[in-house]
Amino acid sequence: MTRSPFLKRITPQLIILAIVLLLNVLVLPDFFTVKFQNGRLFGNIIDVLNRGAPTALLCVGMTLVIATKGIDLSVGAVMAIAGATAASLVVEGQHWTTAVMGALAVGALCGAWNGILVAFLRIQPIVATLVLMVAGRGIAQLITEGTILTFLDQGLIHLGAGTVLGIPTPILIWLSLGSFAAFLVRRTALGLLIESIGINEASSRLAGINSRVLLLCVYVVSGIGAAVAGVIVTADIQGADANNAGLWLELDAILAVVIGGNSLLGGKFSIVASLLGAMIIQSVNSVILLSGMPPEFNLVIKALLILAILVIQSPKVSHIIYILRASTPPAKVDRPNPAKELKR
Amino acid sequence: MIRSTHLPLIVTLLTFVLAYALCASQYPTMLSWRVVANLLTDNAFLGIVAVGMTFVILSGGIDLSVGSVIAFTGVFLAVILRDTSLHPLTAFALVLVITTAFGAAMGATIHYLDMPAFIVTLAGMFLARGAAYVLSTDSVSITHEFYDVLQSMYWKTASGGRFRLIGFVMVLTFIVGALVAHRTRFGQNVYALGGGAGAARLMGVPVASTTIGIYAVSGGLAGLSGIVFSLYTSAGYSLATVGVELDAIAAVVIGGTLLTGGYGFVAGSFFGILIMGLIQTYIVFDGTLSSWWTKIVIGGLLFAFILLQKGLTWASTARKKAATGFIAQS
């Protein structure tokens, strides 16, 4: 009984993903071929999973933030700060585990700053996180002193470019963190509490939910997710680029959450659907690359994708669908409508 | 007595005067007309876009697409002047029509689909940037004699400062913007919408046409800003003006406009722009500070002004609570 609503929830995302992957196969017939060479897996599908790691890591926290009716614009800048921290600690001669811990701590601190602004000073999330989005890249450049900090620490590089049992490390990191978060919110009451804040914060507080601490925690989780993504990106290119690390990734993360059928107005959410959304975005990127279409079309296609989802999610359109369904004979109403899953 | 709605504007004005006095005490040459003229010229495109952003934010919305629209306008003008024999004035008119229609389409989407402005204009941002990429990924230079004529139009002061045409365009935009906001029905409708869409509808404000009008104005001004930017750089480049929307939002907030909408002044945004330009000029004068300090200082100012707004809101709710014994929101 518990599995079937879950499958029903992610069906639209699975269908979209299947269609996009099918397009990939049409463009490149051996898209799914996976080879094992030099002790690691190679293949286009592995590439999609690997390259999608930063977006996937960001969208875990972003899903929770959006479920509370908030938004976190600062994740791209936090990625840059965390990457710069990790790189500068390694360059100073620290062990790479210390560097990663430092980066995570900085990410949590950034998240806590956002959380305090939103939960305690009651500033609208879009404004509160805008401050760090504007100032964050400046702070990252302050840490790297305006240069691109390069490093050769094998331990840190392993996180971005290495493999464990033949599987690239970033894939393992996002899969494990994503499933941990999904289980944590669904096997405990946490997910329900977060949803209740998004639906009506005042009444959830009256019902005894400590909404302020919970809001703070949600932004801290988002900051930590951004820090992990920042470390992976930094490790992958073996350098901290304060200007370009995570640039516009906050928008990709928000897009992934929206493709995952989560309403921007808060409330019900599904982390798994968001992760599928992240993979859909990466698969779209892959189609554009493989088909030899100029990468310039990437943004146009993303924009059309958002518009299509907007139309499906729109309260007005779902109201029209509702009226149409109500006015048709009941025999036709039996089939579940995918649009119904997308609306809140 | 100072009304609390005017307080943010006064704080902005004082900040600007104080900052300028500090800069001038350290570098007396900053008081020259040359610096003032450059301040206007260098921030002309940002100023024009900030006027549009002020209207959007006054109505309680947000427009993330303006930076991309500026880039699109630049590339469009460069490509059209390179490939066709159209006169630049015709091209200007054409691009203004396109960008205004683009803004209107976003406004219509926001109103009729009942979606948050944030996500709709995000799609617009991708679309405009993508369209610019599709036109050309390279930087296309503009070499037209009419551009030279426009660029050589300036008013020179005795001390050598050059007030260029684009600076005048910005000041004119601000004056017209202020008149529209405070002296026309459309302007009052914008304020009403920002105060509360439901109440505005009940009052008989045409919500649909006002929303579409606001985003059309923002799109059209972004197009004008793109024309000014192409005059400023003599080129069109699809990667230009990334993140200008954030600068514009920051300038509007520093200018004392409430981000929830309903309160604010177009003139405030003018001083917001000047404060941001002043920070950059100071960093150039200093020479030892790096450019990233600009971002940090602007972030800090943004934070300070948001706190100020929050404090004012608290003060007024506390007064209400004292009067009625009831508080709606914590």
Image (spheres, coloured by chain):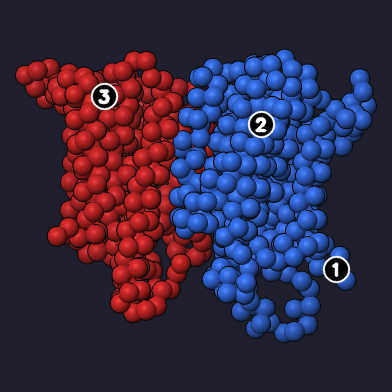
Chain colours: A blue, B red
Relative height, residue A15 to residue A34 (above, below): below
Q: Quadrant of residue B27?
A: top left
Residue A120 in percent (x, y) is at 50, 56
Chain for numbered disc 2: A
Q: State the image coordinates of residue B16 (x, y, percent, origin top left).
A: 23, 37
| Residue B302 in the image: above or below residue B320 | above
Kindly report which numbered mark, 2 or 3, lies closer to the viewer in this rendering: 2
SS at badge 1: loop
Q: Give SS at disc 3.
A: helix
Report the residue at 71% width, 62% height from top.
Answer: A191
Query: Within 10 Å of the Cα at label 2, are there few (<14), some (14-19), or many (20+) other Cα atoms?
Result: some
Circles 2 and 3 on the same chain: no
Residue under numbered circle 3: B147
Q: Position of residue B236 (x, y in %)?
A: 40, 27
Residue at 80% across, 43% down: A175
Residue B178 percent coordinates (x, y): 20, 51
Q: Nearer the viewer, residue A241 or B118?
A: A241
Q: Nearer the viewer, mark 1 or mark 3?
A: 1
Q: Amino acid at mark 2?
A: Gly
Q: Residues within 10 Å of mark 3 (few under 14, many from 20)?
A: some
Task: Please indicate, yes or no, whether residue B79 appears anywhere in the rendered image.
Answer: no
Numbered circle sitting on residue A102: 2
